[in-house]
């Protein structure tokens, strides 16, 4: 039905009031251009149809969602029409006539002369089809607009089929189930075992080669922060105080929030943050919100995000007994002024230019900047400690000699880095002190693993299998109960284990399997039940399972085909310049 809706709506018209330039381009799909006038008519008819169908007036959010759907259906129709024109399917008049007889178009059923006693007269309809060439041609044209899309989608789906062996293997996996108890010896639970600095140093010396790095680089760098000056901060604070006073004097909070707040989430909603408990907001905000009476404004507070003007709108205790506050706020960021930004850019460019001439250290010394040196890095790394994440900066260091000056690097926070290659190191050992925390953690894991292994070996040596569960409970060793476990699934409390799974499915029922060792973890599995697949059930359910698998694989193939075809077309989507769209618009297939 959807396929014809859009086609019919394209023909509809609505009177429109004064709006943006009717010739402005809302979007393009390859060479098909949709002006504002054209698209707005399509969209209004589209939304009106669904509002009527659902018996309600859509909210702005719902209109945004249907705007996305409308656009995607236009894209889908273009893709399908293109495939049909390319000959992906061929349609004969006899096919259309058969379809017309089988499924008369809805519009035809409303023709008065084809109704008898209030009911559609199929016999009279078929007579008209056979005898009236003009009527038959009009009906076939209407049927074609629907039928061609259905045939195309069916043809694409039919290009693939489900493999019986794969479906059977998946069925076997779903039917073969294990119930078990697994004694889980986890070295990480040995919290009484700790690693001293001496342990860490011994571990480092024993594993020194693992801290060896080859073909490394370093940078000298100067960091120029993108930060507000004291004068900038004072100007922002004065603006906030004025806005605060205006609200106290009667200005509309919601309107000021919409016009001024720099919080993209709440600003458009008049600053509304909804309900929240303690621990949800930054401390400065939370303290102000929870101590301010309902209906009152809190004094502006400064957090790492900027200045907040907060109004508490309600207060309650939730079902968990926690105090909740409903509030709205206006966020004004403590950003640098335009003049400060210009100075920031000029200073960065000046240092970079001078460094090209006399080197970074000399340039920084003459201009009063501090030079630092980055951590060692390799070409495979994706971050330079001390500077940040930039693939181009890493590539530059490996493509250029010592003393080479890279382009100015702007970090995600906006800070500028002037970087000069400082060292080429064919071989490098990370010093213990530089990686002390990680070495200590590695030593701790090693030490706990050693003591847990000793415990496990003694456990097995001194106990008989019929004592395992009893003594595991006494020693507070975790015993994981497993019910209806399938191959490859994660086990609660353990996760996925490539070594444990085969043992579970191979172990005899009613006995312990062999000890399994895996990365600081040891397992002793006891299998209590092993449900085997019943071939008779497969024979009984095979037809339905194959049909479902066929439907799934064909629909996936259709979706993949559509995405691939969509990538081939040139799309220009300017709808956000004219409409408020939904926040979660998704690509949709034009369904039959």
Image (tube, rainbow, N blue to C red):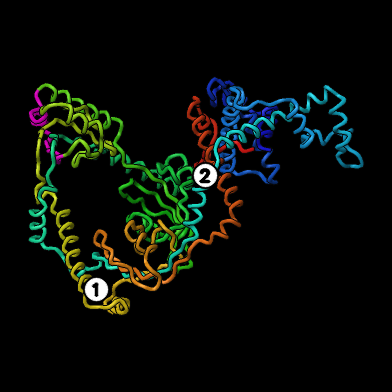
Q: Is residue 82 above or below residue 229?
A: above
Residue 448 x, y percent position in the rendering: 19, 65
Residue 483 relative to residue 410: left or right:
right
Q: N-terminal of the two: label 1 or label 2?
A: 2
Cβ atoms at labels 1 and 2 below 8 Å apart: no
Residue 202 relative to residue 418: left or right:
left
**Marks 1 and 2, how far apart in space?**
46 Å
Q: Give the structural element (helix, strand or loop) at label 2.
A: loop
Asked if residue 295 shows in the view, the reply is no
Q: Which residue is mark 2?
A: 163
Is residue 333 highlighted in magenta?
no
Classify residue 68 by image quadrant.
top right
> Which range of residues does the magenta coloring cover?
358-376
Packing grade of label 2 (10 A; few <14, some 14-19, many >=20) is few
Classify residue 496 by image quadrant.
bottom left
Residue 487 relative to residue 214: left or right:
right
Res 460 label: 1
Packing grade of label 1 (10 A; few <14, some 14-19, many >=20) is some
Q: Is residue 247 above or below residue 19?
A: below
Residue 120 x, y percent position in the rendering: 86, 39
Q: Residue furthest right?
A: 117
In this view, the residue in front, 113 or 467, is 467
Asked if residue 73 shows in the view, the reply is yes
Q: Quadrant of the N terminus?
A: top right
Q: Quadrant of the C terminus?
A: top right
Residue 53 x, y percent position in the rendering: 70, 43
Point 36% across, 53% down: residue: 299
In this view, the residue in front, 320 or 90, is 90
Q: Give the structural element (helix, strand or loop) at label 1.
A: helix
Classify residue 87 by image quadrant.
top right
In this view, the residue in front, 101 or 506, is 506
Point 28% across, 41% down: residue: 233
């Amino acid at each position: 039905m959807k396929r014809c809706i859009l086609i019919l709506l394209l023909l509809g018209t609505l009177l429109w009031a004064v709006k943006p330039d009717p010739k402005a381009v809302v979007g393009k799909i390859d060479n098909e251009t949709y002006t504002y006038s054209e698209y707005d008519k399509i969209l209004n008819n589209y939304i009106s149809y669904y509002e009527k169908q659902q018996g309600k007036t859509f909210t702005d959010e719902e209109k945004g969602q249907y705007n996305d759907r409308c656009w995607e259906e236009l894209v889908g129709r273009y893709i399908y029409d293109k495939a049909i024109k390319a000959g992906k399917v061929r349609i004969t008049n006899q096919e259309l006539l058969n379809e017309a007889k089988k499924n008369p178009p809805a519009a035809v059923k409303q023709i008065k002369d084809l109704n008898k006693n209030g009911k559609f007269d199929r016999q009279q309809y078929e007579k008209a089809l056979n005898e009236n060439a003009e009527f038959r041609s009009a009906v076939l044209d209407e049927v074609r607009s629907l039928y061609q899309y259905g045939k195309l989608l069916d043809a694409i789906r039919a290009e693939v089929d489900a493999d019986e062996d794969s479906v059977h293997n998946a069925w076997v996996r779903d039917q073969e189930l294990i119930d078990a108890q697994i004694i889980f010896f986890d070295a990480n639970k040995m919290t009484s075992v700790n690693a001293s600095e001496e342990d860490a140093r011994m571990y480092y010396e024993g594993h020194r080669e693992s801290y060896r790095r080859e073909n490394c680089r370093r940078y000298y760098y100067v960091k120029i922060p993108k930060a507000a000056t004291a004068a900038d901060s004072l100007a922002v604070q004065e603006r906030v105080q004025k806005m605060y006073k205006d609200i106290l004097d009667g200005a509309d909070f919601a309107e000021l929030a919409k016009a001024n707040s720099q919080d993209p989430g709440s600003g458009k909603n008049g600053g509304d943050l909804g309900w929240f408990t303690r621990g949800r907001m930054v401390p400065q905000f939370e303290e102000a919100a929870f101590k301010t009476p309902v209906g009152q404004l809190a004094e502006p507070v400064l957090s790492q995000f900027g200045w907040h003007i907060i109004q508490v709108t309600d207060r309650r205790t939730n079902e968990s007994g926690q105090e909740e506050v409903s509030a709205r706020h206006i966020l004004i960021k403590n950003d640098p002024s335009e003049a400060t930004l210009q100075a920031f850019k000029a200073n960065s460019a000046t240092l970079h230019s001078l460094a090209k001439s006399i080197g970074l250290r000399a340039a920084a010394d003459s201009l009063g900047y501090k030079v630092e040196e980055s951590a060692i890095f390799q070409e495979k790394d994706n971050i330079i400690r001390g500077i940040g994440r930039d693939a181009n900066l890493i590539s530059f260091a490996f493509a250029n000699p010592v003393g080479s000056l890279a382009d100015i690097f702007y970090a995600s926070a906006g800070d500028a880095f002037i970087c000069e290659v400082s060292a080429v190191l064919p071989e490098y050992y990370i010093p213990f002190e530089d990686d002390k925390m990680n070495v200590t953690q590695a030593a701790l894991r090693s030490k706990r693993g050693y003591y847990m292994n000793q415990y496990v070996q003694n456990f097995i040596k001194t106990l008989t299998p019929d004592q395992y569960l009893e003594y595991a409970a006494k020693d507070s060793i975790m015993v994981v109960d497993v019910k209806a476990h399938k191959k490859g699934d994660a086990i609660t409390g353990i996760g996925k284990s490539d070594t444990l799974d085969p043992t579970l499915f191979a172990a005899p029922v009613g006995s312990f399997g062999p000890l399994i060792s895996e990365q600081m973890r040891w397992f002793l599995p006891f299998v209590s039940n092993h449900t085997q697949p019943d071939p008779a059930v497969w024979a009984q359910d095979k037809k339905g399972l194959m049909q479902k698998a066929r439907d799934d694989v064909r629909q996936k193939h259709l979706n993949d085909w559509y995405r691939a075809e969509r990538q081939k077309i040139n799309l220009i989507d300017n709808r956000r310049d004219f409409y408020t769209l939904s926040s979660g618009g998704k690509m949709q297939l034009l369904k039959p």
